[in-house]
Each structure stands twice: as structure tokens, then as C-alpha cells.
Amino acid sequence: MDMSRRSLLAATGATAAIALVTSAGPVSAAPGPADGTYGASSAADAAALLERAETLLTGGAFDPADPDFAQALDTLGDTARGLWDTLDRDAGRTTLWVDLAPVTDAGNFGQSYTRLRTLALAWATPGTPLAADPDVADALVAALRFVHDTAYHPGLPEKGNWWFWEIGAPRALMDCCVLLRDRLPAADLAAHLAVVDRFCPDADRRTNSPALAETGANRTDKAVIVALRGLLGQDTAKLASARDALSDVRDGGRNSLFRYATSGDGFYEDGSFVQHDVVAYTGSYGTVLLGGAAYLLALLAGSPWAVADPEVSVMYEAVERSFVPVVFDGLMMDAVRGRAVSRERAGDHRDGAAAVAAILLLAAGAPAAYADRWRAVAKGWLTRNRTTPFTSLATLPQIALAKEVLGDSTVHAEPRTTGSAVFADMDRVVHRRPGWACTLSLSSKRISAYEAGNGENLHGWYTGDGMTYLYDADDLGQFNDGFWPTVDPYRLPGTTVDTRRRADLGTGGGTSTYRPANAVAGGAVLQGRYASAAMELTGPPGTTLRARKSWFLLDNAVIALGSGITSADGYAVETVLENRNLGTGGRHRLTVDGFPQPVVQGSAARFERARWAHIEDVSGYVLLDRGTLRTVREERTGSWRSVNTGADTGGSSVELTRRYLTLWVDHGVSPTDARYAYVLLPGASAAATALWSLSHPVRVLANDAVAQGVEVRRPGLTAVNFWAGGSVGGITASGACSVLVRRDGPRVSVAVADPGRTLTSLTVELPYRVRTVGHADDTVSVTPGRRTLLTVAVGGSRGHTHRAELVQ
């Protein structure tokens, strides 16, 4: 239960049903004194809110014998017992735990507070071995005093990672004070509040850089800290400051968490979430933000400091727009977890559980129109994920949230979400079908290819180069089962790479991002069902690798095209179709052109002019251009430490071994204008894959410097990514754009986007006449004629889709 810092904050910020929260007692609505001190009424309010804060941490009253709580209770008890047994309680100690020495290092005192919080939580939770033990309480008070006097007090300058000083340590410290408030001497509490006033005086500014306004998840984290400090110190001004920080009253709403961002950090109207200015981060920082906002809304509800900003609806809308598309049966898609993918204790299932808990807590106080839908969706997630059940990941209060929904017969379990989404503002594409999902991780000069730093994400070089995540409803452990420390990081699915060796990323202090020079990354969505995506690949600095990559996401297939693959660096260049984690003992059969391949570790093969391949229980792969297919079946060994050496998130050195099946197209050394064309058929049998390769239900219309496009006959769909003005499949575009056209009887549906954001207007000409316009976005004007002309005002639309419905 020694979780990562981000997961820990998310867990403690999203932890109790409103029925538990409000059980602490009623809170008045009378305002406190203007001078920031408490009156009698405010003091009573604060006492009730502190009870509520404790309930948010412990879960309040529950039956320790309830089997649904048993695992979480045992985990908390076992973890706390281990920490108690190794805690140095000697009067002459120089640290609290020998592995966190010297305690004066930011990472070490930050983690010391986190461990003390775990001990305090066990002390305050009935049913654990340490519950209500006065010796434990006394030792905790003394340990908190030791860390304050030795490593974390107002007289110190910030050194090392600012996060520990301004967020990690003060949040864990305030939680400890909430739990131990009746045992803390007044002088100790005053000292702890003073250090918070020094390093986190408000949520609006970075303390070590006062000109820097806090944004996104960092602002939420700090608002929670300031609110708890206000309650513990009986300071109404601090409480008001915490509430107002959510709306950024200080700066007129510029960094409000209840507004849609158009650049930089925050939630975007298209469902994107960005943190650190250029990183797609819904599944890490976004979850922290949602959990923190849900926590404060619940904590302050009904009090004089309740959040009353009407724009809080933006947070409600973000659940459906930002989170539901990227949560698959309870797991959080790695494409939106940034450097957190390298954290051993924060896998996709755990971050998914934190998001589910945050959504359920937010639902407790949200309008029924939102809450009813969220509960149904969450119930579907909770019931379908049997690989890593929620109860094996959740805290006690989070389990209380889930039990409330699972036990409510009026809440139906919503089926798995389907549909397509292009998150243009964070260069991500998600395509969901009833039994599978495909997610594309793209990058551009706007959104980073990766983030690394503080020892995290050491091998993230190619995660934003078109990595293609294939999620199978029957295999929810694919990316959670030791994938990142054991996968070949040079052969991530969907990427086109050269084979040069790369130096580890992010080995120094601080975090950094890499944004490639390309403009094109994104695509268009038609009818919420079909999508096209394009990315102009530019290799890292010092390399000459270039490629044009397209994906067309259909009902039962993903078509991947590549052209212009060129490099003059003397390295072999490869496009990876698949690199499937088969687990510790997987023996999935590989079949190529009807011939089963040996199930022998280390076996490798080269197939000239291959037509198709199939991995048992995974997917079919059809090579449309009959290129050179190479395969390898191998066991790979690695440790989490090899991808993350972070101070508080670093992985263990225990070596893991997993089996992989890897398929790639070999473009040769220093290729010139090479290409590829292949199809993913998720869940298809070998027979269905063979039939697909013979029947050609999809026709490649173009795969060159002008355009990449396909025609799909059965649904009447033509999809083209134009790299320049030209004509493909009867569709003519005046410039670079993504176009999807579907003809269904007399109805013609059109979707257009400018994923490069280089144009102000473009025209798209269709090869047939239309009679009327059923509907068109305000940005689309239609000129009927023998060949219908659409003029699309794409300028300023940031790569989003423009739509029209026409009738012939």
C-alpha cells in the first residue's frame, strides 16, 4: 500500500459517499466573521467539517466483519504494522526509517509524512491491530515533531523537488493532524500549521516562484491543503481562500478549474486534459484534479464556505467528456497517464480505480441528471473488471462508495462505452467497440511525445510516436502485467522507429518534455463511430527519420498506412504491428499465411510477401501491400527500477520475466520513401483473418505524398488524410486535411478537420450532387451543384471536426 504520490493524493481525495460525509453532523450556512477568526457558530461548523474530513479518510462507521471491507482493512493493518515495527522510536534517532535517510532530503521527509499518515489512519480505523492504541498516538505525535524540528520547518529554504515542500509533505501532514487532532498538543499543532503557512500559504501561487500561478491538479492539491489548514487553525479566511482558489477569484478566473482551457493546463471542451502545458494527462493529474475537487465540494457542502460557483458544471461535464472515453472496464488507458506509466505502484488498474472513486464521490453531490448516469457507468466498470477487482485496489471509504452503487437495484450497469473520439487538444484518439478499444498516442509541436524527469519514465522515447494500444475485453492485464519494465521499448506497437540505442531519459532533477517539430497530429470523427487520424513523424533531434502515418478506425478493423518513410542515418527502420505481452507462461499460437509457427521461445522468422498473420486470442493482421514481415517470440526480463528510479515512485529491482510476440515490417537500412499498409482485426479468428485478406473489404485509395485514404464498401465510407491539396476517391480537397464521407442511401454525412492547424479555410468537393442540407455546422457552407462543394472555416478551430449532413 506504499503508493505513488499522485495515486496517494487521488486516493485520499476521493473517498466517501455523501451519506458518510454528512454523518458528521449539520453545518450552518451563516458566514464567519470578516476578520478571519471563528465565532461560536463557525467553531461548531469547523468541528463538524473536521469530523467530515476524518470520515473522508477513514470511511466512517462500517462493519469490520463485512467481507467487502476485509481485504482493504487487512492491507491497511498489515502495511501499518510493518511501518510500526520498523519505525525508529529511540530518543536519539536521526531518521524515522532507515531507508529514508537522511530525513532532510525532500523526498525522504515527504515519504516520512506519507508513512506517518498510513500509521495515523490505521490508528483511527477500527479493526486494525493499531486501532486506538495510545502508544501509537504518542509515537506519532513525537514523530511528527521530530520531522518538523529536523527537516521541515519554516526556517528552511526549499531544496530539491518543490512538490514535496509545497504539496506532498503538507497534504500528508494536514491529514495526520486531522486524524490526531485530539491528541496533538496546541504547540505542536501551531508548529505544523506554521510550516504549512510557510510552504503552502495559498493555492494561487508557487511558493518558490511567486510569479508562477498554480494550475490544474497542483491548484486543487493546494486548495485541499489550505482548506484543512483553515479548519485545523480555525481560520475562516483560509477556508474562503481554498474555496476561491478553485475559481481563481484572485486572478479573475484565469486559472479557474471550472472553465474550459483553450491553451495550457486544464480540461478542454473536446474532453482533452493537459498538465505541464503540453502533456496529455487525464489519467494522472486529471484524476488528481477531479478527486481533489470532489473532495472539497463534499467537505465544504452546506457550510458557509461551500462552493457556489455556477461554472462547477464544467467539472461535471468533464466526467463524461474526459474520463468515460479513457476508462476501459475500470482501467485507465496508459496513453493519458504520462510518466506515471513507469510507476510500479500506480498501474492502469489502480489509476482507473482512483478515477472511479473520484467520479462516485462527485456524484454524491452532483445534480441527478449527471449523477444517475455516472453511477450506471461506474457500476458497469465495477462489475466487468474481474482481472483486478476494485476492492483489491480501493481504500475503505472508496469501497463504501462502490458498495452503495453495487447494492442499489435501481442503478443498472451501463454496457461498455462505444464510439470514436479525437481529442484534438491533446493529440489522442480513442476508438471503442463492444469487445475492444484502440487508442493512439500522437505528438506534435503542441503536445509532447513524452515527459520524463526525477528518475521517471526512463524509456519513454517512442510512447508518443503513434503508439497503438489495443485493449481486449478478455485481457484486461495486457498493459498492467509488468508490461513497461519488460517490453522492448524500441518496438512499441504502431510506431515507426530506427534501431539506434538511446540514452535513458529524465535521470536528473525536475521534469522535462520533448515536442517534435511536426504540425500534423489528429484527425476527424464521423457520426461518433468512424475516425481518421494522421501524424507526420519527425525523428528526434540529430536524426533524419521522417514518415507520414495514418489510421482509419472502423467497425471491426483499424487500417494503418505509412508512406514517405525515409532516413539517411545508417540504421534499420521498422514499423511495429504488434508487441503483445503474453504474460508469464503464454503460448498463444502465431499463424502466418495459414501455417502455424513454432511455440518456442527465441524463435524468429522473416516472411517475404506475407499476406496475413494471426495471434491466437488477440487479433488478426493483414498486410495489404505484402511487405516483409518479421516476427519474434521471446522472453524478456526487466525490473521496474530500470524504468523508474524516482525518490518516492522508484520501482523495485526484482526482475520480472514476460513472454512477447512481436510483429514488424522491415523497411531496411536508411530507406527512401518506404511504405506500409496493414490491418488490425481485434478479436478475429485465424479463419476470419484469412477470409479478410482474400475478400478485400477495404480498398486502399492512396498511400503517397499527397494523401492516404481508404474506401470501405459495406458502410459506404471513404476516408482520406490529405497531406496536400489533391483528389482521392472522387473527393477533392484544396489543402491538407482529414475527410470522412459516408453515403447511406440518399444521405451523405461529411466530417472535415485540419489536424495541422495551418489553414484558415479549405474546400472539399464531393463527387455527387446533393439536393438539400439537413444540417451543417456554422463553420461549413454548402454549394450544391453537379459536384457539391463544401467550404470549411477551419481557422481557430484547433483541429476539431466540422460536420455536415446532406441529402441527395
Image (tube, helix red, strand yellow):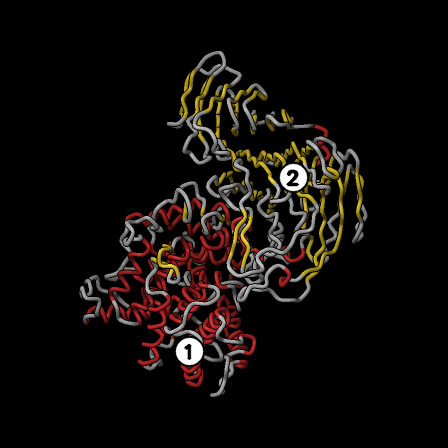
Residue 724 against residue 462 in the figure, above or below: above
Q: Residue at x 52, y 53 (%)?
A: 512
Q: Which mark is residue 545?
A: 2
Q: Is residue 243 visible?
A: yes
Q: Earlier in the sequence, mark 1 or mark 2?
A: 1
Left/right of residue 347 with respect to residue 64 in the rendered view:
right
Amino acid type of disc 2?
A: Leu
Left/right of residue 597 with respect to residue 298 in the rendered view:
right
Q: Residue furthest top?
A: 786
Dot 2 alpha-carbon crowd within 10 angstroms: few under 14, some 14 to 19, many 20 or more: many
Amino acid type of disc 1?
A: Leu
Residue 550 against residue 151 in the figure, above or below: above
Pick the residue in front: 384 or 286: 286
Q: Residue at x 76, y 36 (%)?
A: 628
Pick the residue in front: 179 or 383: 179
Q: Residue furthest front?
A: 542
Estimate the x, y position of residue 467 in percent, counting from the top left: 60, 44
Which residue is identified by label 1?
A: 144
Left/right of residue 531 with respect to residue 253 in the rendered view:
right
Residue 534 against residue 71 in the figure, above or below: above
